Amino acid sequence: MQRATFLVTLALLGAATAHGSTLRGGNVLDSGMQPEVVARTLGQVETKWQAEAYSFVKCDPAHGDCSGTPNAFSKSCSTIMSAIVQGSGGDPKIAQEYMNTVCSQNIQGMHKAHCMNLRKALGKAMSADTYENRQNFNPSKLCTNFWSEFVAEEKNRFAKEEEARIAAEKKAAEEAAQKAKEEAERKAAEAKAAAEKKAADEVAAKKAKEEADKKAAEEAARKKVEDAKRVKEEAQAKAKEAADKLALKKAEAEEMAKKAQEKMAEAAEAEVEHKKAQENAKSKEDEQTQKEASKKEEVKEVKKEEAKEVKKEAVVAKDVKKDAKVVEVAKVDTKATPAKAEKPAVVAVVAKPAAKQEEKPAAPKPAAPVAAKEVAKPTTQKK
């Protein structure tokens, strides 16, 4: 704030210093005071004044002093007004022309209004006496009066801005509400469309499912019929195969039964032949038995004869033994009388029958087993 005030002061006093003269009697635009710079700088200072005015209007007496003029405003305002008065040489006409030039620069709105109000206040504060203005000009009174007007203007502006803000906010709220309503309607429409689409999709899905289920049922029924047909064909094939196997088995059984009957017939015939053979063998066996019995009787007679012969031989041996004892006795006696030595010849003669007994032939063996084999032979060959 102080820097901006300083720039304004430099701009106002720059020309007087540079040209070595005041602004009296000359065209302000030709004075070199650069009004456009002063207008731009003054606008920045007024922005600060507006901030102070806003704080002053919003001031709460319960929390501070809300009376009087802020020191910052008084100081900057006094500096600017003094610079303009001194730059004009105290001439109110020159000061008014300069302020007209400054306020005619490219500034708009509230800044232009403030600039014109400041020009008006300056015109009221300056007297017609240029010397008096140069020497005794009091900017404080001007700034205090200007502050009251400035605050009143700012208060009205704040009120209008507040109304505009409230109206804008209301309008924005209405627009937001309208937009929200439209958005809600749009969302409701979208939701409705989505719900309708969902319902349509569900109907389509249900219809598709029903068609799919119908097709699946038809396919299942067709497959069931095909399976039943296949099972029937397989069952018929298996039945035919079983029938063929049964017929084959039956034929084999009949063949086996036929062969069994033939075997039974052969067995019966063999049994008859066997009985005949047994009967023949029995008759031959009886005949052989009779023969063997006769042979046994013959053997028995032979053995009786042999026993008799053995008995005779035993008797002879006994006699020989006796004769041997006689010979021994004779030997003993011969030692005494040699004339008795002729006795052993008698012993030799007595022993001859025993030698003849050893030359007898053995009894013949029975032939019954051979006859038995010959009887059984025809039965074996038949088998």
Image (cartoon, rainbow, N blue to C red):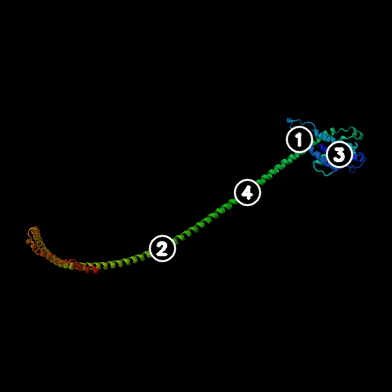
> How much space separates mark 3 and mark 2, taking CA atoms?
121 Å
**Disc 1 element:** helix
Of tags 3 and 1, which is closer to the observer? Answer: 3
> How much space separates mark 1 and mark 2, taking CA atoms?
107 Å
Q: Residues within 10 Å of mark 2 (few under 14, many from 20)?
A: few
What is the number of the mark on residue 206?
Answer: none
> How much space separates mark 3 and mark 4, taking CA atoms?
64 Å
Write the residue at 76% across / 35% down: 55
Figure quadrant of the C terminus:
bottom left
Horizontal and vertical percent for residue 330?
8, 59
> How much space separates mark 4 and mark 1, taking CA atoms?
46 Å
Q: Between disc 4 and disc 1, whose residue precedes?
A: 1
> How much space separates mark 2 and mark 4, taking CA atoms?
65 Å
- The residue carrying mark 2 is 234
The answer to which image quadrant residue 237 occupies is bottom left
Residue 252 appears in view: yes
- The residue carrying mark 1 is 55
Q: Amino acid at mark 1?
A: Ser
Residue 153 appears in view: no
Horizontal and vertical percent for residue 368?
17, 66
Of tags 3 and 4, which is closer to the observer? Answer: 3
Are dots 1 and 2 in contact, CB under 8 Å? no
**Disc 4 element:** helix
Q: Between disc 3 and disc 1, whose residue precedes?
A: 3
- The residue carrying mark 4 is 187
Q: Between disc 1 and disc 2, whose residue precedes?
A: 1
- The residue carrying mark 3 is 10
